[in-house]
Image: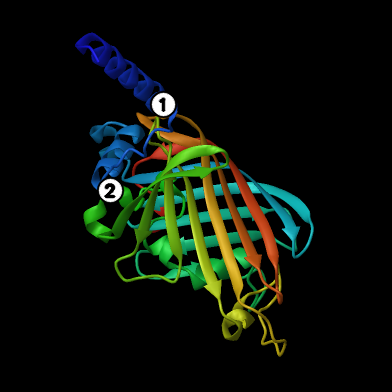
């Protein structure tokens, strides 16, 4: 075989290899947790703007939708307040059945309001059982000044980059978050691969039969049950969208929280959607 023939065949093989490679899916970009967090912080705004937002007060409307464990919708007003490690969300509704949902961490203790003596909603009970979400500053994402990624040295969580994961038909960077003191929840943060905005957090937990008496139905007191049941699963997620500038920060203006309790005893599926309109930055009187 002539040298020219061998050369032509080699070039042909290289060209074919190039065609095959071009149609193969791109490999996940390998990021370290530090690189991902750094890009995320840049997506929020410049360091000067982030430093000035030590306190946040955000107002808007809320829509509660009960899809399982009851049926119906109700609209109300929402106030989100945060300063340092302190964080609060206050929802008010023109309803005697569900007048208010107040969730507050004052820097030492987390509290959830009772709409009747001894009675909390599924949302209130979920956070009473998993108060680490407020104590870590995870709840509300970048809508809270206590968002832990703003100052990781304070919380010192364990972070693990989990690659690109498909969520809702879109590939997102996944970051596993484990609080330093541990948690029964599996927590995963998701970031847009183009903007690095934080657009979703997922929470997962398995509840064993002996603990299921603590799962309340919507608007009911939790009570012991003699019914034998299988393991229950709690899945919750936060979604953030409609990012727009506010005082130098790029923040979401639509925020959704969904809570799903998959249980034979007290199943529930409820979501809260917030449309946020008024943003104030600086000192916050609620925590003084």
User: Residue 132 has which mark?
Assistant: none
Q: CA distance from mark 2 to mark 1?
A: 32 Å
* Mark 2, residue position: 33
* Mark 1, residue position: 20
Q: Where's the N terminus, which quadrant?
A: top left
Q: Residues within 10 Å of mark 2 (few under 14, many from 20)?
A: some
Q: Nearer the viewer, residue 112 or 212?
A: 212
Residue lying furthest top: 4
Q: How far from the left and from the top, in percent, is residue 122?
A: 63, 67
Q: Which residue is found at the position 31% from the left and 71% from the top?
A: 181
Q: Is residue 75 above or below residue 85?
A: above
Q: Disc 2 on helix, strand or loop?
A: helix
Which of marks 1 and 2 precedes in the sequence? 1
Q: Residues within 10 Å of mark 1 (few under 14, many from 20)?
A: few
Q: Nearer the viewer, residue 203 or 14?
A: 14
Residue 113 showing in the rendered view: no
Q: Where's the C terminus, which quadrant?
A: bottom left
Would you identify the image quadrant in which residue 46 lies? top left
Which tag is nearer the camera, tag 2 or tag 1? Answer: 1
Q: Disc 1 on helix, strand or loop?
A: helix
Q: Which residue is found at the position 29% from the left and 66% from the top?
A: 180
Q: Which residue is found at the position 61% from the left and 77% from the top?
A: 231
């Amino acid at each position: 075989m002539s040298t020219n023939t061998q050369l032509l065949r080699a070039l042909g093989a290289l060209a074919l290899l190039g065609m095959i490679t071009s149609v193969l899916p791109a490999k996940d970009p390998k990021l370290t947790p530090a690189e991902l967090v750094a890009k995320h912080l840049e997506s929020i705004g410049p360091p000067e703007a982030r430093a000035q937002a030590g306190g946040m007060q955000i107002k808007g409307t809320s829509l509660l939708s009960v899809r399982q464990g009851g049926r119906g919708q109700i609209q109300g007003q929402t106030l989100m307040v945060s300063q340092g490690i302190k964080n609060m969300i206050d929802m008010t509704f023109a309803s005697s059945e569900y007048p208010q949902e107040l969730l507050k961490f004052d820097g030492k203790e987390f509290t959830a309001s009772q709409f009747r003596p001894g009675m909390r909603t599924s949302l209130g009970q979920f956070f009473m059982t998993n108060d680490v979400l407020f104590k870590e500053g995870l709840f509300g994402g970048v809508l809270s000044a206590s968002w832990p990624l703003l100052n990781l040295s304070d919380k010192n969580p364990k972070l693990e980059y989990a690659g690109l994961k498909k969520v809702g038909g879109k590939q997102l960077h996944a970051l596993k978050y484990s609080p330093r003191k541990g948690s029964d929840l599996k927590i995963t943060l998701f970031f847009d691969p183009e903007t690095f905005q934080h657009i979703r957090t997922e929470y997962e937990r398995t509840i064993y039969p002996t603990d299921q008496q603590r799962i309340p139905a919507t608007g009911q007191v939790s009570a012991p049950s003699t019914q034998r049941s299988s393991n229950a699963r709690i899945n919750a997620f936060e979604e953030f969208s409609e990012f727009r500038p506010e005082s130098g920060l790029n923040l979401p203006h639509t925020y959704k929280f969904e809570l799903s309790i998959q249980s034979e005893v007290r199943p529930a599926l409820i979501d809260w959607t917030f449309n946020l309109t008024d943003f104030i930055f600086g000192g916050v009187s609620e925590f003084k």
